[in-house]
Structures are given as structure tokens and as C-alpha cells.
Image: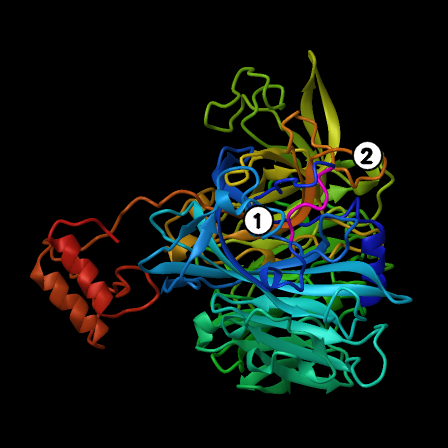
Amino acid sequence: MDMRSLALALVAAAGAAPALAQDSVSRNANGGSGLPGDVPSAWSATGVRSAYVVDLTPFATSRGTPFGVAPLMKAGRANTSRFNALNISGTISQALATGAVFPSPSYIRWTQAGGGINTFENDASLNAPVSPTGPASVFGVAMLDVDEVVAGTSNVVTNHVSAAQVAFDPAQPGRLFVSRVNAASNSSGLTQPDRSQLGLGSIDAEGNVCIRADGYGVAATGTTPLQGDNYFRIRLPARGTSVDVIDNSGGTQPAATDWLLVQSGVTTAVPTAIPATLAGRSVLVGADFVGQLRTETNAGVLTSTGAHRPGALDHRGSAAVSAKVLFPGSVATGAVLTRATGGSGRTDSISVFGLGASGAVTGARTITTPAAVSDQCDAFAWPFASGSIRGYDSQMTFRGGVGPVAVSKDASGLSLAAATLYSGSTPNPATPQNAIAVARFDATQPSGPVSWTLAAWVDADAMTGKQITGDYGQDGAPGTGDAGEGDGQVNALDAPIGRLAGVNESSLGLSGPSLSAPAFDSAGNVYFIASAIFNRAQGQQIVQEYGVGLFRAVYNGSSMCYTLDLVLRTGQIVAGANSARNYRIDAVSLSDADSVSSASMASAGATQQAWNNVASEGLAPESPVALGGLVATARIVYDVNQDGQFLDPTAVGGNPASTDEAYNVLLYVGNLEQPPASCDPDLNQDGNVDQDDIAYLINVIGGGENPTGIDPDFNLDGNADQDDVSALINVVAGGLCP
């Protein structure tokens, strides 16, 4: 499906598609239904740039791991008949900047219903300014939204890439300071024709947003429609409050817009980038349709190479970038799906490659899926049936997300790669018969052994799937208070709480794949979206119901096994910390009938660094600190009148008089806990904590010998410098560990 056709199809199905937003509801000034809500026009000054606080709401996964959740951004608003547009892809930065400056000097915060950023639809008297000080930890998030409006006699598909630099104080991880910017648009106003169509690539903590753009099917005429395939980078700190429209002249805000691939005749996939946090500058990386990797080896200049895929005919879909380093001389690692030279033409392989600070490939290895792959824990032989790796079909290559393959490293130093398998020798991007395969190997050994297992699987023909675990007691249903429920451990007293299921098991007539692409965290856990059958209590009986959820497959490195943990699911109710209203997660995107949905999970939906860049080697896989952050698109409905019904007035067949409000948003899931302070100040390991340890650290930072092998980054801020010496002096004097 092409980019414009996808957008039209999504708009037509608005009631069924998902996405997420900042935690607020309107003051309902018109006294009628919840419309228009409180999303400002995407072309207004407030819609272009705003700064606000989002507080996380604590929750626990089915296995009891504590996290925080909040809607970070609402999709923009272009159509007056809907609360907001559809959010069709989202991403988070692959590296975190620590010891940084807060991106905005001041933010607004509200804790009552009606507070928010909209000048007209929120009550400004409920807002309070907040001006944080001190060093901040910063990450980036971005999303692409689409909507359909009428401009004259033309149907126009609007696109907006909204992005934010999100900061927090590590001493208060539950409070996020969001500096949101409308990075790029494809038209200049509500009644204007579209000049381009956009695809979301990546963002880094420094606010560099990389996108793809073309002019397929746009309504504009003359010289303004964008020609060919194009890559742009929009620098958020340089953006003002006017719209940056992408067309055949580039961006209308050239001071903030880098045009990196200009009107190319070769088709390209959505790009990613090496974060400036790692490389010193944003380094765009993109895959084209002739098997070449295009990297920004000099600022503003792309070069092509095939060195990233040894032993492969070509590649498929978009490339992914991870902050985990697998190859010597690298600052990051890339991965892309490939077709092995000796294969049968199927997409049967994963090519993993190192990336230097200049974007040059520093080493590469291609691994090929075996003929049969099993779940190591369940001893289940999934019916691969000469299938292939997919998740890049239809709109995915052009709209995002990035990407269909994930790469990381486990605590033992071995490389991990994961992708979603589709069963059957005839490629079917809509088959519900799927599994997420994980490979473990040494990336630097071209012929070294590869171990395979399954993190998740669905046998749609047999109507079965991998079991989901939880601390719900003997009946496997939450809230019944039976033996073993909520005792803080998952053991023999706890029955499975459900299982993964094929979308064909739903009574809603759904079709498409049953599993999204995977995303890794720092511990090798795999996050994904899937359809499932859940247990729940109905009176005195335990019944099963179909739903869609965000799952975590918890990694056991010693056995190379994965255990499923439910993170969030449709129907779940969350207490909004800022809106003072409950919201229900009504939809989490999985498939769009002919392929996996762009709004579903992709590898760039999570970061492979641990929270606040803490050392991941000593973390238990189930620790919430192992997750540096995750974003997912969803549709949420606020119970504005607090009657417990969550009635979307825009839903087909719903109550148009309802005062409840429904939004498509970008949902953030992350750690709420501060890791326990632990450090060993005896750096020279002589049994004493004294001035000699300080002298030892100064010598190592200065380039001297390091016989005890310490990490000179004592304060864990990503740099080895005078701040580490100061932190050690404080600890030696009796202060707390950094």
C-alpha cells in the first residue's frame, strides 16, 4: 500500500486505529459533548511549540514489575469532527544525554481537570509555571500523525511530525519535562493542499529529527509538489513558532532544516541515525531499494556502501540503530533484514554491522535463520514451514516505524538480534501465524555458532500460543483474591493468566499478523505488541476474552529462555496524574489488515540503554531500571464526567452527547524507581578508602595505567572527567554514591 493510500485507509478507520497524548482534558466551554477537546490546531503557535510537565502514573506488570506510564503527546488536530488526528508511528531516542541542560527554561504543570496548553479550550488559571534547575537527563520522542481534510474540491491528507525533547531529574524520575515542537508539516494550513507525504525515521536527545518525504499523490500543483525520494533532518532547538512545510524547495524553515537526500530517483526506506550523543553529531543512516546503505559520512553528505550485508543479495525494509556496541571501533550498531546469497530468495537473514562516529561500517556479520526454530522454554516447535522474516511490507518502509529488526547485547557480552517470522513458503504479510525469533552470537566471528530461540509465538491454525505469566493466583485472573495472588512472586501457585492468540481468534473479524516487530531493552528483554486471550472473572466464573496488549518477554541468559509478562492491555484503566481523570486504553495498534501497522511496535520504540545510563551488567532482567524508556501509540478515552463509562462521542454507534474525550496519543512507559546507591570507592583495591583511591582515579583519567580495571566514569554520566573525581572525593568523605 502506498503512503497516501495508507493514510486515507487509516483516516477512514479512525474509530479502530490507535495513538497517544499529554495528560489533560478540556474545560468543555461549549457545554455540549466532549468535542472539540483541547488539542490546538497543528498550525497554531501553541500547536508548533509548547512546554509542559507530564507526571507518570505508577502501575505494575502482571509479574509485579513496577513502572510508570503517561501520555506524552497528543496527535495534532486538523479535522473539526474529531478530537485529533491519527498517530501512525512513534519512536524514542536510542541514547540518553545525562548532565544536560533542560531544553526549555520554563514549563507549565496542571493537576486538575481543565488545565492544559490550549489557550481557548483549557483553563489557564489551573496552570502553574515550573522552572527546573540543575543538570537534567534528556531523551527524544517523535510521532507522525495523519488526517484527511477538504481543501477546495480536493481531499488533502495532512501530515505532521511532532517531536519532543523530554527531560527529567534523576532524583525525581516520575516527573517529565516535555518540550514539544511540530517539527515538520506537509501543508501550510487547514485549507491548503498537501505538498508532500512524510515518513518518520528517528530522533536523538539533542532534538535531531530525521524523516523521509516524497510527493506521491499530493493535491498541490505547479512547482511546489515534492519530487523524488528525500531525507530531511529538522533540528528542534532551531525551530521557532511557525510551520516548517516540506515541499520541492526543501523546508520553509531552512535555518532548522537540513536537506540530506535531494530528489533522488532511487526509492528509499525511512531513515534512522546515529545519535549526536554517541557520534558528536547526528549521522543519518538509510537503506535504499538497490541494496545500498546510505550514511552521512560527512556532515550533509551521504555515501553508499554494501559492506553492511556480507553474504547477502540485498536488504529489505528500514535499517535500525542501537546504542549497544558490538564491533571494535564502533560507537553504535546497525541491523537490517537481508536475503542470503545461498538462500532461496526469501528474506531469511539479519545483517548486523558496526558504525563508526563518521557513519562508516566498521565490521559486519550476516546470520541466517535455521529451517526449524523452537521455543527453548516450552519445547515447542513452531511451524516455520519455509517461511521468512517480514514486518517491512506495505506502508512500513515509507511511513515507519523503524525498524523490523532489533539488535542488542546481553550481560555476557554476546550479541542479540530479533525479528518476527511469518510462516509459509508463499510470502503473506497478513498471515496471523507468527513468532519472534531471537539469535545469540558473537558478532565479530563471521563463522561462529548461532543459538536461536523464540521469545513469543502464535500457532494460529491450532489456535494456541505462548503462555503469559503473572502473579494472579491459582485461577490466573486478576482481582479475585485467590491463593497466591499478589504475594509478590510468580511460582507454582500462579496459573497462566492467558496466552498469545492469533488475530483470527477475535470475534471482530480482524485480519493481519498477530505479533509486531520486537524491541530490546538493556537486559535483552523483548518488548512487542500482540493479540492474546486473557483470563478474567465474570461473577463466580473465570472466562476468557480477546484483547491486544504490550508484552515483555523476560530474558534468562543462562538457559536462553523467555517468559512472558503483560505490561499493558486494551481495556486497562489508568488514573491520569495531571488530568485528575481516569482514562481507558481503548486501542493499541497491531495490524491494518494487509500487514503489520505502522503504529505498532518497532525496534526504535525502546532504547537499549538502561534508565539514566546506569550500568546494565549487574541488573536483574526483571528490574524496571533495565528499561531506558519505551513509547507506544494508543487511543485513550477520558472519563471526564466520572461516571465510569468512558464513552467516546465520536465512536461509530456511540453516544454523540457524551462529555468524555478520546485522543490518539504517544504513550511512554519507564522506570519510576531510583536504583539503590552502590559503588566501590576502593578503586586501587588495597582494602582502604582514602586519598590513594582519588590519586588512582586521577591517574587513570589522565591516561595512566589501570591494573585494577576500574571504569573511570565513577559518577556514571557517560564521561570520564573532573566530575568523577569530585564524586569520588564526596564518597571518600562519607557522602552518598552517585
Residue 408 in view here: yes
Residue named by callout 2 = 654
Q: Position of residue 374 (x, y in %)?
A: 67, 47
Q: Position of residue 241 (x, y in %)?
A: 57, 69
Task: Mark 1: give few (<14), some (14-19) or many (20+) Cα within 10 Å.
Answer: many
Q: Range of the magenta residues?
A: 33-39
Q: Residue at x 70, y 13 (%)?
A: 539
If you read the primary sequence from the N terminus, does the residue marked by circle 2 or circle 1 appear first? Answer: 1
Q: Is residue 30 above or below residue 159?
A: above
| Magenta stretch contains residue 316 | no
Residue 597 versus residue 617: which sits nearer the camera? 597
Residue 692 versus residue 461: which sits nearer the camera? 692
Q: Quadrant of residue 98?
A: bottom left
The colour scheme applied to this rendered structure is rainbow
Q: Is residue 278 above or below residue 577?
A: below
Q: Position of residue 441 (x, y in %)?
A: 54, 62
Judge left or right: residue 432 versus residue 521: right
Residue 462 in view here: no
Label of residue 22 in the image? 1
Q: Quadrant of residue 48?
A: bottom right
- Give the quarter of the figure containing the N terminus: bottom right
Amino acid type, residue under disc 1 in the picture? Gln
Cα separation, mark 2 vs mark 1, equals 24 Å
The furthest residue to the top: 540
Q: Residue at x 59, y 17 (%)?
A: 480
Secondary structure state at the residue bearing disc 2: loop
